Amino acid sequence: MKRMKFKAVELSSLDEDTIQNIRGWRNQDFVRQNMFCQDIIKSEEHNQWIQKLKADDNRNLFVFYLDDAPFGVVIYTYDTENNRVETGFYLIKEEYQQMGYGVILSYFASEIAYNVLGYDNGYGEILEHNKRVIRINRYIRKDIKKEQINLNGREYDIKTVKGTRQSWNDFEKHKLGMLVLKFVYEDYEVLRGKNTNTYKVSLKA
């Protein structure tokens, strides 16, 4: 695979066609089966959700691109009570799972959470059958626990993952980054509103 250019575009910088495409990407069967809410999202519901995201300073949505082609969606929700950001993400094409794009998605989801948005603590909940994402997390971190939660009257077996900006920069990003940087250039762009910032991946030896 040739090296590609990574770019992250926040909701405020997305065009309307891409915003509407997010609903179609999310409604695919292979995406919904790994969601807590597996219902088909209707157009009106999607538009209301987008407006709520835009009005909420504690939530961010990004579409991730490789060589200007979208490949993943990432949503960050800051939990003020526990001082941590919860990250959720998915690939937009099922075949990307076989191409290693999930590793790139996981890597930059954390990189942006800690080194662009500036959060100190991270948290995630993964359905236990989502083996691909669990496998990636097991590779880079040890703090993974099995739990059971009740959501809307239904029990879910999940894995919870926790991390910190310090652990990411000192250890975790190096493990994933050595692999990711074989396929992605070190310099990457983040578009937020009217601002475009360029960052450089820096791995500690």
Image (spheres, rainbow, N blue to C red):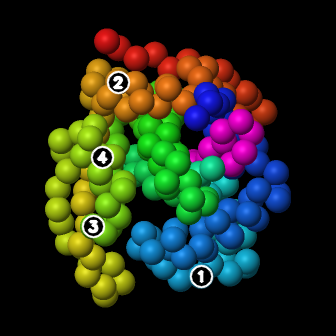
Residue 171, located in which quarter of the rendered image? top left
Labels 3 and 1: the sequence-earlier one: 1
Labels 4 and 1: the sequence-earlier one: 1
Labels 4 and 2: the sequence-earlier one: 4
Q: Which mark is residue 128?
A: 3
- What's the CA distance linking mark 3 and mark 1? 21 Å
Q: Residues within 10 Å of mark 1 (few under 14, many from 20)?
A: some
The amino acid marked with disc number 3 is Glu
Q: Secondary structure at mark 3?
A: loop
Q: Which mark is residue 40?
A: 1
Q: Is residue 133 left or right of residue 23?
A: left
Q: Measured from the top left, where is residue 157 in percent x and y?
A: 23, 72
Q: Is residue 58 left or right of residue 53?
A: left
The amino acid marked with disc number 4 is Asn
Q: Main secondary structure of the magenta part?
A: strand
Q: Which residue is mark 4?
A: 137
Q: Which mark is residue 174?
A: 2
Quarter occupied by the N terminus: top right
Q: Residues within 10 Å of mark 2 (few under 14, many from 20)?
A: some
Quarter occupied by the C terminus: top left
Q: Measured from the top left, where is residue 182 in percent x and y?
A: 50, 26
Point out the stretch of residues depicted in magenta.
56-70
Residue ID at (44%, 37%): 107
The amino acid marked with disc number 1 is Ile
- What's the CA distance linking mark 3 and mark 2? 26 Å
- What's the CA distance linking mark 1 and mark 2? 38 Å
Q: Residues within 10 Å of mark 4 (few under 14, many from 20)?
A: some
Q: Measured from the top left, where is residue 48 in percent x and y?
A: 68, 71
- What's the CA distance linking mark 4 and mark 3? 12 Å
Q: Measured from the top left, where is residue 26 in percent x and y?
A: 60, 68
The mark lying in front, picked from 3 and 1, is 3
Residue 185, located in which quarter of the rendered image? top right
